[in-house]
Image (cartoon, rainbow, N blue to C red):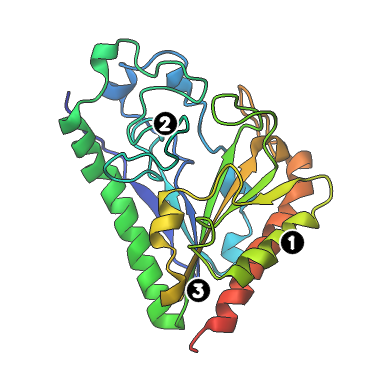
């Protein structure tokens, strides 16, 4: 199989302060030739991190840079290692170019249509590599200009997914690569804010400890601090088709989300030009 796309691999807005917000799973684009190989269910791209740009609509006001994926994670998962190695060995995961959904159903109508190594390499070159190059370049720019760079990797997921975890997931799942991707003081501050959020549960380095982006780009010894937040979609939207944004629900969590992002910015700027 071959792979081509006419869609740019990302959208990017440059900010003025030392924070980059990355949204690697909000993309919904699937090139037509590839979509024809998908099941009807997969063409709905149900495992998208829906509406995060709307939820983080305060990012521009705060002066953050914003990097947003355009293609569906079913095309290629930007938060996986480029060689497809598992981020959670021994646990059920989806791959760099997934062949199954979060519900463990096939993405491809015919197993013979699954991508081979050549197609995976083409998708990686067209989408994964440009996204990560832009991410790395922006972090380098921020660090050069401010002496520090902060990376907030924004995600969301259904609150109940038996394939990946038992029961209901906490609402605010902070991940720092088990303490490797940011200063512990920052992690503690973010968790304290999350715990103050009425009606929302929270955890640090629980089921989700941060994917490839957090683990790879977070280098606190070099003054680059990265944190992943995996939110339950029930905190702000409808978790099943038609996946509607629920403004009244979202208004309950958005102030807490903003306070965490502001705290990360305050931390970064306290370290700037040291």
229 left or right of 124?
right
Secondary element under disc 3, as helix, strand or loop, is loop
Q: Residue at x 77, y 55 (%)?
A: 195
Residue furthest out toward the bottom: 274
Find residue 115 and report its image quarter. Answer: top left
Find residue 268 and report its image quarter. Answer: bottom right
Task: Say which label, 1 or 3, has the lower sequence index.
Answer: 3
Q: Are marks 1 and 2 in contact (CB under 8 Å)?
A: no
Q: Looking at the picture, tell me which residue is in the foreground, 205 or 264.
A: 205
> Considering only vertical position in the picture, is 179 above or below 49?
below
Distance, label 1 to label 2, CA atoms, is: 31 Å
258 left or right of 105?
right
Residue 85 horizontal/vertical position (percent): 32, 40
Q: Which residue is mark 2?
A: 94
Q: Looking at the picture, tell me which residue is in the foreground, 65 or 80.
A: 80
Q: Residue at x 27, y 20 (%)?
A: 114
Q: Which residue is mark 3?
A: 18
The circle drawn on residue 193 is 1
């Amino acid at each position: 199989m071959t792979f081509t796309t006419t869609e740019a691999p990302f959208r990017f807005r440059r900010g003025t302060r030392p924070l980059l917000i990355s949204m690697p799973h909000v993309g919904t684009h699937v090139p037509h030739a590839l979509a024809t190989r998908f099941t009807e269910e997969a063409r709905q791209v149900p495992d998208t991190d829906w509406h995060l740009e709307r939820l983080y609509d305060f990012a521009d006001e705060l002066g953050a840079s914003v990097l947003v994926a355009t293609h569906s994670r079913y095309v290629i998962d930007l938060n996986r290692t480029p060689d497809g190695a598992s981020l959670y060995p021994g646990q059920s995961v989806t791959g760099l170019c997934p062949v199954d959904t979060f519900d463990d159903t096939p993405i491809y109508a015919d197993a013979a249509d699954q991508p081979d190594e050549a197609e995976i390499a083409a998708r990686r070159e067209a989408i994964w590599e440009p996204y990560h190059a832009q991410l790395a370049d922006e972090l380098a720019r921020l660090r050069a200009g401010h002496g520090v760079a902060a990376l907030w990797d924004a995600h969301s997921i259904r609150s109940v997914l038996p394939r990946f975890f038992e029961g209901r997931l906490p609402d605010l799942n902070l991940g720092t690569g088990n303490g490797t991707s940011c200063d512990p003081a920052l992690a503690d501050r973010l968790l304290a804010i999350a715990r103050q959020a009425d009606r929302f549960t929270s955890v640090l380095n629980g089921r989700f400890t941060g994917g490839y982006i957090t683990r790879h780009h977070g280098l606190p010894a070099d003054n680059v601090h990265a944190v992943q937040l995996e939110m339950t979609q029930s905190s702000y939207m409808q978790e099943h088709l038609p996946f509607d944004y629920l403004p009244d629900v979202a208004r309950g969590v958005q102030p807490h989300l903003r306070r965490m992002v502001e705290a990360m910015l305050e931390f970064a700027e306290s370290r700037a030009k040291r």
